[in-house]
Amino acid sequence: MTAGSAAPTRPPGDLMMWVLIASELAVFGAGMTAFMAVRIADPEAFAAARGQLHPIWAGINTMALVTSGWLAALAVRHCERGDLRPMRRCLAAAALLGVLFLAIKVHEYAGLAAAGASMEGSAFFTFYYLLTGFHAAHVAAGIVVLALIARWPGLRNAETGVAFWHMVDLVWVLLFPVLYLLP
């Protein structure tokens, strides 16, 4: 906000998207809280299981989603100015980074499956697959949302869809340290 500009009178986008975002954050928060509670009961088993993960791949995924969030925000800026071509380019780049995220996640799942890490094998992997799988479903949905914004570009559409995409980013930024970095 620049000096002398008025404060926004409404949240960006559609109010129902904010209701959805709040409910999704509550679901992910409950899942992470349950993960942490079970982790406290058996920290050694969780640390051993976490050792099978690849935090470098997860770090690359983090950079991909954060960068895609920045590109999506740029798309909204372009939409505000009526610059549809650069808006669509930013949305396409953001969506491609979402596809990269999913490709890395599939590669990670395949490696874990080959190593015998399954949902039934440990509490850690039960939570890991539930949380990351649910998040991956949101990434896939977000890619569709970004494509819809590119097809029907309006400021309200852009703000609404990009708010969802930012929620997807935020959830990953919270999941990444909890799943990959905590000892």
Image (spheres, rainbow, N blue to C red):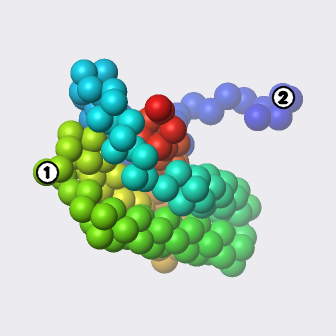
SS of the residue at dot 2? Answer: loop
Name the quarter where the N terminus is drawn. Answer: top right
Rounded to the nearest whole Å, what is the CA distance between mark 2 and mark 1? 58 Å
Look at discs 2 and 1 and give the one toward the viewer. 1
Quarter of the figure with residue 20: top left
Q: Which residue has dot 1 on it?
A: 120
Residue in the image at 47% along x and 68% along y = 104
Q: Which of 1/103 is in front?
A: 103
Q: Is residue 164 visible?
A: no
| Residue 180 point in image, percent of width and height | 47, 43
* Residue 99 in the image, given as x and y percentages of width and height: 48, 72
- Total residue callouts: 2
Give the side of residue 9 with respect to residue 165, left or right: right
Can the viewer see residue 92 in this picture?
yes
Which residue: 49% across, 56% down? 54
Q: Check disc 2 and give the amino acid type.
A: Gly
Sequence-first disc among 2 and 1: 2
Residues packed near mark 1 inside 10 Å, few (<14), some (14 to 19) or many (20 plus): few
Judging by the rendered image, the residue that carries numbered circle 2 is 4
Neighbor class of circle 2 (other Cα within 10 Å; few <14, some 14-19, many 20+) is: few
- Residue 135 lies, with reference to residue 37, above or below; the image says below
Residue sitting at x 56%, y 68%: 97
